[in-house]
Amino acid sequence: MATDFSSIPVLDFSQSQDAATKPAFLLALRHALTHVGFFYLAHHSVPPELVAAAAAFCPEFFALPDAEKERVRMAHSPHFFGYSRLGAELTKGAVDQREQFDFGTSTGPRWAEGDPDWMRLWGPSQWPEEHLLPGFRDTFVRYAAALQALSGALLALAAEALGLPRDAFARFFETDGNQDRLKVVKYPVPADDASRQGVGPHYDGGFLTLLLQASPHRGLQVQNFAGEWIDAPPMPGTFVVNIGKALETITQGVAIATSHRVLSPEKGSTPRYSIPFFQMIRRDRIIGQEVLELPPEILKIKESRGQLGSDSVNYAEYHEVPAGMVALVSRIKSHPDVAQQHYPEHFQQFFPDGLPAHGIAY
Ligand SMILES: O=C(O)CCC(=O)C(=O)O
Ligand SMILES: [Fe+2]
């Protein structure tokens, strides 16, 4: 296809802050949203020292004593926050070769007795003991807040790029605090006979994902319209931004969520680290029933670009159930043992034969 991509565009965030260069930024953003679903964001607003501090903590976290990682393991958390050991996570039923620590920005409205159980997805994070990793919690709280602010600014720009008012997406967020999710991820060098599925092909579920590639390893790949895997190598000073299925859904498929995966580091290499930030939406809306009206010239882009090749079965539920339920089901499928502990009825429904041999999140 003529408009298919063979590399990931680079956008300069600073252009969006200057009236003279903003139109060019919005055009580039429109193209990235509608034809690629991924872009690098350079010259962004997050201080480089904060990014460097977060990256430096990645190997340190995973070097914590096993007992401490056990203490904060995800199975203790109905909010799916905490530590998952290697091989604990599934993508479409296959085991991912990664270890991770999930946490969230500060919590918005919480679950209360009588609320649907997907309201419980939001809640407090678990943190390692301060004396074992001084500064870790403070750094990541500040990092998360900075990423939340940047993702909000970027989403307002995305609205403008699609011919919408800046606040077009506001109604999909809690007004008194929205909880976004982050994780610190380690992709080890696999053993000789192990699979190289760092994380299998998938879509992200929310609005925008802002990924820090926290070590110089290649491995992230993005699937184009023809189904080819395009490398997205680390580029210092940037975040890799991609679109999730919720944003695709409410823009009537104009902004595209693109399938991506991570290959484990090569034999003889060292572990790869990354820190994705996932912009989440409020839980109580069936967003497929609230799609945005878009200007005709923007809707037309869909026709000129053609059909996306890869499957879009995942997240079709956005048309049927509240966004919180969609997010909960996605977590349950990835972390069945957390579900078994905290959401036994859903667990029974998705895993009627009991816990898979893999998929234990500790
Ligand atoms: O680690 C990466 O580079 C990407 C991770 C990812 O796609 C995800 O966790 O959704
Ligand atoms: Fe992803």
Image (cartoon, rainbow, N blue to C red):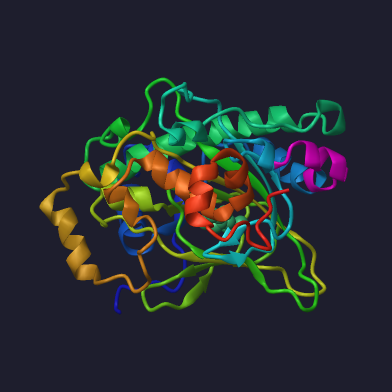
Residue 117 x/y as whole percent: 46, 34
Quarter holding the N terminus?
A: bottom left
**Secondary structure mostly taken by the magenta-highlighted segment of the chain:** helix
Q: Nearer the viewer, residue 206 or 147?
A: 206
- Residue 78: name its quadrant: top right
User: Does the stretch in magenta take in 66?
Assistant: yes
Image spot of residue 114 (x, y percent): 42, 24
> Where ligand 1 lies, by image quadrant?
bottom right
Judge whether residue 331 can be spotted in this image.
Answer: no
135 is within the stretch colored magenta = no
Q: Is residue 236 above or below residue 133?
A: below
Q: Is residue 118 visible?
A: yes
Span colored in magenta: 61-73
Give the residue at x 76% y 70%.
190
Q: How many marks?
A: 0
Left or right: 253 with respect to 266? left
Figure check: 225 above or below 179: below
Where is residue 338 drawn, in percent x and y? 62, 45
